[in-house]
Image (cartoon, grey):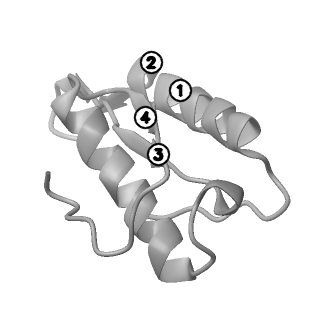
Amino acid sequence: MSVVMPGIGLNDAAAAAERLRAAIETTGFAWDTGGSCRLTVSVGVASKGEMPDTPEALLHAADLALYAAKRGGRNRVEIAAPVEPGADATT
């Protein structure tokens, strides 16, 4: 899932992502058949001001940050570093 927040700076977007991550982590989900579970989420955040000026580059940067969050232990928010066009999202 992608969320676009026009007019929001990188720090505010990261703070919003952290609030969402924390809310998901603390919410219990009950099954109709009994039992429950908790979910976690990893989030990659990128800002247009930090990236090349194309939607594709911005989405790619957020994807790189998402993979970094998963490699870093999951259930966390990772902010994208500026990337070169053509960088591999799986590394």
Q: Is residue 1 visible?
A: yes
- On residue 78, the disc is 4
- Label 3 vs 2, first from the N-terminus: 2
Marks counted in the figure total 4
Q: Secondary structure at mark 4?
A: strand
Please report contact status of discs 4 and 3: CB closer than 8 Å, yes or no. Answer: yes
- Say which residue appears at 50% left-offset and 22% top-offset: 22
Q: Is residue 31 visible?
A: no
Q: Is 11 left or right of 24, judged from the image as shown?
A: right
Residue type marked 4:
Glu
The label nearer to you, 2 versus 4, is: 4
The x and y percentages for residue 63 are: 35, 58
- Label 1 vs 4, first from the N-terminus: 1
| Mark-to-mark CA distance, 1 and 4 | 17 Å
Residue marked by disc 2: 26
The label nearer to you, 1 versus 4, is: 4
| Mark-to-mark CA distance, 3 and 2 | 25 Å
- Say which residue appears at 23% left-offset and 25% top-offset: 72
Residue marked by disc 1: 23
Residue type marked 3:
Ala
Please report contact status of discs 2 and 1: CB closer than 8 Å, yes or no. Answer: yes
Q: Image quadrant of residue 7?
A: bottom right
Residue marked by disc 3: 80
The x and y percentages for residue 23 are: 53, 26
Q: Is 29 left or right of 57, judged from the image as shown?
A: left
The x and y percentages for residue 57 are: 47, 73
